[in-house]
Image (spheres, rainbow, N blue to C red):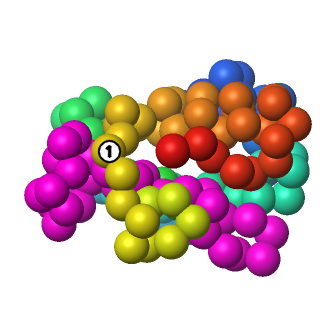
Amino acid sequence: MEFIDMLFAEFGDIVSDVDIHSVSTEEESYRHIKVTVRLVDGSSLRVSEFTISGEDLVRYSYYWLDSADALIAGWDNAPHHREVSTFPHHKHLRRQDNVLPSEERNLRDVLREIQRRIGEGAGPQPTS
C-alpha cells in the first residue's frame, strides 16, 4: 500500500510500525483510511483521512498520543471552531479545549512537526 510505503520512506527515522484499522473505498473515487502510526519514542499517531478521487483530502484528523494515551496534540478540520483564524483547520494542544490555529493540514505536515519535536530530543511536547 503506497500510503504505508510513504510513511516508512519519508519518516522511517520516527515511524516504528503501522497498524491498519480500516481502509474502505466506495466506487473508485472515495477512500477512508484509519491507521495508528507507532513512533520510536513510544508515542503514537492516530490517523483518519477521507479522500476523493485519490488525492483530494476532504476530512482529516491526526491525534498524537503519548504512551499512556494522553493527548499531546491533535489536528483536524472538523468545522466546529469558527473562532480560529485558520478555520476549519485547527489543532488541540494537550487538551481538547485548548484550540489553536493550524498550518498543518495533511499527514506529511503533521509528521514533519512530530519529526522535528522528536529530533530536538524534547520528547512529545509540541510548541504552540
Q: In screen coordinates, is 103 left or right of 70?
A: left
Amino acid at circle 1: Pro
Q: Who's the residue at 49% across and 31% down the image? A: 109
Q: What is the count of numbered marks? A: 1
Q: Secondary structure at mark 1?
A: strand
Q: In screen coordinates, is 107 left or right of 90?
A: right
- The residue to which callout 1 is attached is 101
Please say if 63 is above or below 97: above
Q: Quadrant of the N terminus?
A: top right
Q: Is residue 34 visible?
A: yes
Magenta stretch secondary structure, dominant: loop
Q: Who's the residue at 80% across and 69% down the image? A: 67
Q: Position of residue 118 (x, y in %)?
A: 79, 38
Q: Is residue 58 visible?
A: no
The one nearer the camera, 25 or 20, is 20
Give the extent of the magenta segment: 64-91
- Asked if residue 60 lies in the magenta stretch, the reply is no
- Asked if residue 66 lies in the magenta stretch, the reply is yes
Q: In screen coordinates, is 85 left or right of 68?
A: left
Q: Position of residue 107 (x, y in %)?
A: 48, 38
Q: Who's the residue at 60% across and 29% down the image? A: 112
Please say if 13 is above or below 124: above
* Residue placed furthest toward the top: 10
Q: Who's the residue at 59% across and 34% down the image? A: 113
Q: Position of residue 82 (x, y in %)?
A: 12, 58
* Residue placed furthest toward the left: 82
Q: Position of residue 18 (x, y in %)?
A: 70, 52
Q: Counting other residues with Cα less than 10 Å from the Cα at mark 1, is it few (<14), some (14-19), or many (20 or more)?
A: some
